[in-house]
Image (cartoon, coloured by chain):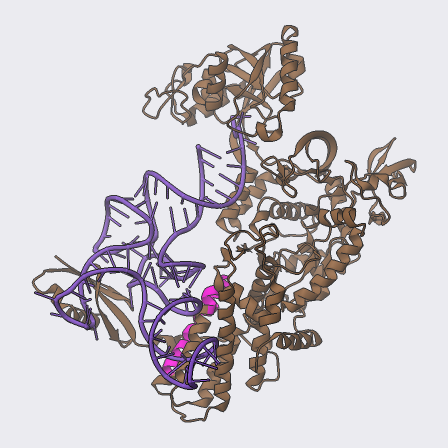
Amino acid sequence: MKYSKSVDEKWQAKWAKEDLYRFDESKMDKKLYCLEMFSYPSAANLHCGHWYNYGVTDTWARFKKMQGFNVFHPQGFDAFGLPAENYAIKTGIHPKDSTNKSIKTMLEQYKNLGGSYDLSYFLSTCDEEYYKWTQWIFLKLYEKGLAYQKEAPVNWCPSCQTVLANEQVVDGKCERCKSEVSQRKMKQWFFKITEYADELLKDIDSLDWPEKTKKIQKNWIGKSTGSLLKFEIDNGIELEAFTTRADTLFGLSYVVIAPEHEAVASLTKPEYKQAVEEYLAQAAKVKEIDRLSTERERTGVFTGSYATNPVNGEKVPVWVADYVIASYGTGFVMAVPAHDERDFDFASKYNLPIKRVINDKNNEPQPLPFCEHGILADSAEFTGLSTKDAILGIVEKLSKEGKGKLTTMFRLRDWLISRQRYWGAPIPIIHCEKCGAVAVKEQDLPVKLPYNVEFRPDGKSPLARSEEFMNTVCPKCGGKAHRDPDTMDTFVDSSWYFLRFPDNKNDKEAFNKEKINQMLPVDKYVGGQEHATMHLLYARFFTKALRDMGYLNVDEPFKSLVHQGMILGPDGQKMSKSKGNTIDPDGYIQKYGSDVLRMYLEFAFAYTEGGPWSDAGIEAIARFTKRIEALFEKYEEAQDETSEMGKPEKDLNYVRHASIKAITHDVDLFQFNTSLARIMEFLNALNQYMQGPINKAFLKECLESFVLVLAPFAPHFSEELWESLGHTESVFKEQWPAFDETVLANKDKVIVVQVNGKVRAKLEVSPDTDKATIEQMALKEVTSYTDGHEILKTIYVPNKLVSIVIK
RNA sequence: GCGGAUAUGGCGGAACUGGUAGACGCAACAGACUUAAAAUCUGUUGGGACUUUGCUCCCGUGCCGGUUCGAUUCCGGCUUUCCGCACCA
């Protein structure tokens, strides 16, 4: 037998014919939901990243199937999105046509990859049967007050001609096309994810996710505890400021309002109007990216107004400055130059007073600005208190007068979901002149995307130009009305697809409650870390919102999460067409077969790390498969020379069980590289055994164990080997092999003897030797080191070592 | 700036809860087979020392220090690279 691509094809056909990977909905007690983040349909071949994600995770899924789990392993497509639309603008090929064509070719390629998918659960987010329910969820969120429309400054990408969510802006640039994002005021739809900020934060701790991802998500939500303090302005209005350091209130020397704040005009005194207006105009011109820079010098102007310090009645000037962010907190802050770096710089520049009110923990004055916690100074009755106690004391005093309270603030903003583009799910809202924004009736869903549309983007959704689409009647009053021309962010589609998979054919509801409660959470979710603050956060939000609306009973969608690393070009650089260092997996499958590619990716890297592609590495795996073939050929020709279970048999049996144990442990943890290393060791032991007289029945048993542990790593190849051993059923119907602890325990142990921490001898002892005997043997072995020295103590670690400490 | 991760042979990477550092593989070298080469198989392979070439000794997991009988692993302080956040009050 020679493993090659034709072996792949043979078994792929058999699997399909047998429907081998069918999920059994009757055995829910053993269900295991294994999911890779679904992919975007692309016209190009699968790239290394796809193989690394889908191929390698498939090994885990197959392993679990052999362990007796009823594995649910679906496959689908995140089919809406900008690339298809941009492609349409360029070529004139309709997104629907190009997408469906891409899906077809990609499905064919997923087959080549040998994935154990049950395609009867297939879904594609651009299908009407799917986006109907995306729209339905929008309506539910709208009913619940979790979807709302507001006019707000939004991130505008001039190249994509659409608004972006905060999460899609990276360093002031569009995450997708890297164009500089500008600010525009527009009326847009938002999802109130901030309503769930607290729970989203709190539940992170319960997740089996990479610590780093949890940290990123926590930071993104960005909870900070502090207080809201009320400042009376001399024009009669009251403004609230958020601060984490209410203890510094006696050091207040001015307050600052953000330029975008609506109260700016009302509190600007006439004689300062010109200066303030000039400043606002100038601030508006500053590019978002510059404004984000911490290097930039802080600027501002005095408004002419004064605010009253709520704790002591002192009047302080009100300034406008763009170092205050309008969208965080209240857009209005108190400034304590002595104990805040920004305020210190600003006060120094504009000659504002700087008053020390915090000393260090030993109550010693420190150079300013001193931003740490400490002991209060010069703060009336609070002098001498610690920062912590002073915050409580001051806020308590203020709260009695209705001027302050403890609170929490989040960095997280609401999720802007409107997109001025065509290829997405239309927002199911109708705008009526009389009734305003009116929800489309549920029975009228889906709001279908019209096919005949002019794609040319001009800042408005292409749908806005489609008369056929736009013109409709108001569901409330029956009068003339028009549809919302925007579509939803594609992250909306992917925020619930894992809920649709288990019930993908349901035409009555988005998913059946009972079914989804049994199927969720996803037990193992595998995909890139770049989704830490977008997809993974949005999907959690949807799950919690749908739970609160009574559609399911799970708190978290993804119980356990794994991020695959990235496969780099052979030069160690990120693969990119412009660098010319891309690797096309297709050629390698043609040459070696898909199992070789899969095993190469598994063996060459730590899964969560990834690393540079190496032709020598894949060649090594090809040799590994050849060595296996050679072994099996040799076995077939071998004579049965002994029926004994002598030392060679016992040694091989030990390696066999030790390998099974190690592989079982490692695959479970996504440690494929070490798993394959153990399989190689097992192979080496088999080869060594075959050099002596052969007990053929025993050898066959060992070869069967070998094929069983190899099967998830090399599914096609293993089927072929399994068949060659005389089996007629698929190896994936077999149980994952068990290991025998007694075989492992009965092996002689090597005990290391250390003297003062250095290895000086090794003992080989039988497993039943007792501690006293081992210590005696150890002492005898190292007399040349211990002679003439006093032995202070002896440490014995069972099965491992004896450590002798001498003077 | 803040937060997190990372650092191990020529290379990819192992090392369970503090217990033989370098598993497994690549590359390299030597040998076998061959007229020869490729392929294959076998062996060696972290560095150094030697007036005992050894079941030898010393050094060695980014750097400096500490805890411990014993540290790649724990603690403190640096450095590198990568990542996240970044005027968040």
Chain identifier, brown in the render: A
Establish if A415 lies above or below A445: above
For the stretch drawn in magenta, the main secondary structure is helix
Seen as rendered, the residue at the extreme top is A271
- Residue A763: % across, % down: 23, 72
State which quarter of the image contains the C terminus of chain A. bottom left
Residue A312 seen in render? yes
Seen as rendered, the residue at the extreme right is A479
Judging depth in this view, the residue of A566 and A196 nearest the camera is: A566
Establish if B59 lies above or below A800: above
- Residue A352: % across, % down: 48, 12
Q: Is residue A179 left or right of residue A566?
A: right
Judging depth in this view, the residue of A669 and A768 nearest the camera is: A669
Q: Residue at x 36, y 80 (%)?
A: A651
Display colour for chain B: purple
Q: Residue at x 53, y 39 (%)?
A: A219
Q: Is residue A511 left or right of residue A3?
A: right
Seen as rendered, the residue at the extreme left is A788
State which quarter of the image contains the N terminus of chain A. bottom right
Judging depth in this view, the residue of A623 and A325 nearest the camera is: A623
Q: Residue at x 58, y 36 (%)?
A: A171
- Residue A707: % across, % down: 52, 78
Residue A593 seen in render? no
- Residue A359: % across, % down: 36, 21
Q: In the rendered structure, does residue A554 fall within the stretch colored magenta?
A: no
Q: Is residue A776 left or right of residue A84?
A: left
The span picked out in magenta is A650-676
